[in-house]
Image (cartoon, grey):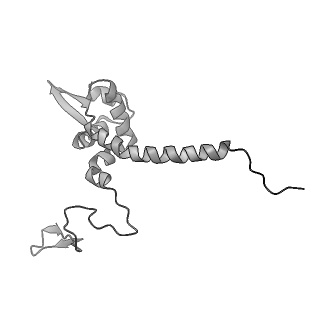
Amino acid sequence: MITRGRDPGVIRKRIARSGSSGRRPCARVRAAQLCNMMVTRYPAVFSAIADPTRRAILDALRGRERSAGEIAALFPVSRPAISRHLRVLRGAGLVRERRMARSRMYRLEPAPLREVERWMAHYRTFWAARLHGLRQLVEAPDSPGPEQP
């Protein structure tokens, strides 16, 4: 909730503390609220990889270090748009920037992606079990049902 302070020109946020310490966003989980600590601990990483253009930039950097111009040439969007995407990726810690004279070189920084992969491993196990159950159901011989005339 945004409120005005005593000074009419100053706007500040007021944080409701409904019994929580305010340090951990998931300290109080209600029954209808699903809270995932991995997503709340690394919101910048998940937000960055949610965009398909940013994922494509990460794919392009997987092979080797590239300049900003090389990266921009791979996409049908403007250079300023690619620059904004690179800024978001850099802010999330997914790419590292190195300045060489007048150009900037970017390389993939895989450490934050390891955290994402670790989080996804639980879902991979879940889906493997579900697909195994589906396979057994599909491949099972038809059980005898009621006779049809």
Q: Nearer the viewer, residue 5 or 25?
A: 25
Q: Is residue 142 left or right of residue 28?
A: right
How far across and down, in percent of the image, does residue 121 sit? 39, 43
Q: Residue at the front extreme?
A: 144
Q: Using residue 77 as the reference point, say whether residue 80 is left or right of it.
A: left
Q: Residue at x 27, y 48 (%)?
A: 44
Q: Position of residue 108 (x, y in %)?
A: 27, 31
Say which of 115 and 146 sits in front. Answer: 146
- Quarter of the image for the N terminus: give it: bottom left
Does residue 110 appear left or right of residue 125 in this picture?
A: left
Question: What residue lies at 35% left-to-right and 69% top-to-bottom?
Answer: 30
The image position of residue 39, as x and y in percent, is 32, 52
Residue that appears at 16% across and 28% down? 99
Residue 147 occupies quadrant: bottom right
Nearer to me, 147 or 96: 147
Q: Which residue is the extreme one toward the right?
A: 149
Quarter of image, res 100: top left
* The quarter of the displayed image where residue 37 is located: bottom left
Residue at horizontal 40 percent and vertical 68 percent from the top: 32
Figure quadrant of the C terminus: bottom right
Residue 90 drawn at (x, y percent): 23, 39
